[in-house]
Amino acid sequence: MKLVIVKDYQEMSRKAAELLAQEVKNNPQTVLGLATGGTPVGMYRELVKLYQEEGIDFSQASSFNLDEYVGLSSTHPQSYRAYMQENLFRHINLPKDKAHVPAGDAKDLEKECARYEEAIHEAGGIDIQVLGIGNNGHIGFNEPGSSAESTTRVVQLTQSTIEANARYFASVEEVPTQAVSMGIKTILGAKKIVLLASGEAKAEAVRLMLEGEPTADVPASLLQLHPDVTVIVDEAAASRLDAAAAGSEDKR
Ligand SMILES: N[C@@H]1[C@@H](O)[C@H](O)[C@@H](COP(=O)(O)O)O[C@@H]1O
């Protein structure tokens, strides 16, 4: 995995946006894999800026989001569809029908999961997948214990994830307990992966991802099985790494 340690959140966001913009410039039909959470907000802000200032053209691109809460409609303000709309989709010229987010309010969720997996396949697979990381090492909503063979499915959120995500809701009781999430196998199927982490709270998860054995107990560590992963972390998130003591950039 390629590790890039940057000074702060701002630099992490800019670097990640530049990577995505470059990808779209190189291949206008890029299939983007997108993530939500607090971490990529700055990256989307920078990407919108690049779109406005440099005219990056998304008209032939498409996107697939990692996950969505079960039970929230696309118009619910805390749904990941609403997040994407607010932070990215409404600002750029990505065609609406090519911006995919799982439907967490589908009547038949199993069918929705199979449909989503098939849609990724039909689009030719994901070219570049953006990821954040949960405090417990989850990616997407693949909680500890998720198999490397898992595909898009309904998952149960752990209490720690529910509590961590409660800050976006009025109360912890309002946080959905389930989600539709791409699986580990779906994520590892992307041609390239970029994982972002910022802040001290992520330092232990980042350490286990990079320096621990690959194990389903820390889903992000399974990214070690992928040949093209770039991890962009700020100094606080890198603070527990052996590599952080050695220098700023490192290839492993
Ligand atoms: N499903 C999302 C993940 O994709 C995200 O990486 C994680 C961390 O979120 P944050 O970036 O807000 O710390 O939160 C949620 O659980």
Image (tube, rainbow, N blue to C red):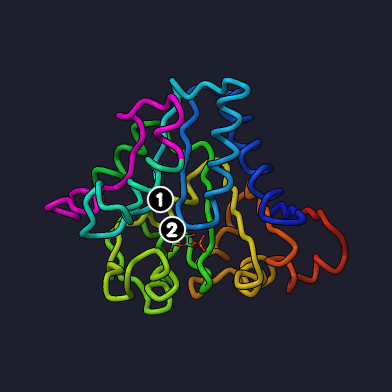
Boundaries of the magenta span: 88-113
Q: Amino acid at mark 1?
A: Leu
Magenta span includes 107: yes
On screen, residue 203 versus residue 177, left or right, reads right
Q: Quadrant of the C terminus?
A: bottom right
- Identify the residue at horizontal 47%, vertical 57% (top origin): 37
Q: Position of residue 13 (x, y in %)?
A: 63, 47
Q: Which residue is mark 2?
A: 140
On screen, residue 119 versus residue 231, left or right, reads left
- Identify the residue at horizontal 71%, vertical 59% (top origin): 234
**Ligand 1 lies under 8 Å from the Cβ of mark 1:** yes
Question: For the residue labelled by badge 1, is the local secondary structure a helix, a strand or a loop?
Answer: loop
On screen, residue 40 versus residue 250, left or right, reads left
- Identify the residue at horizontal 50%, vertical 29% (top origin): 30
Residue 214, compared with residue 117, is above or below; it is below
Between 75 and 33, which is closer to the camera in this rendering? Answer: 75
Between 220 and 74, which is closer to the camera in this rendering? Answer: 74
Q: Position of residue 181 (x, y in %)?
A: 35, 56
Contact (Cβ within 8 Å) of mark 2 with mark 1 = yes
Dot label at residue 66: 1
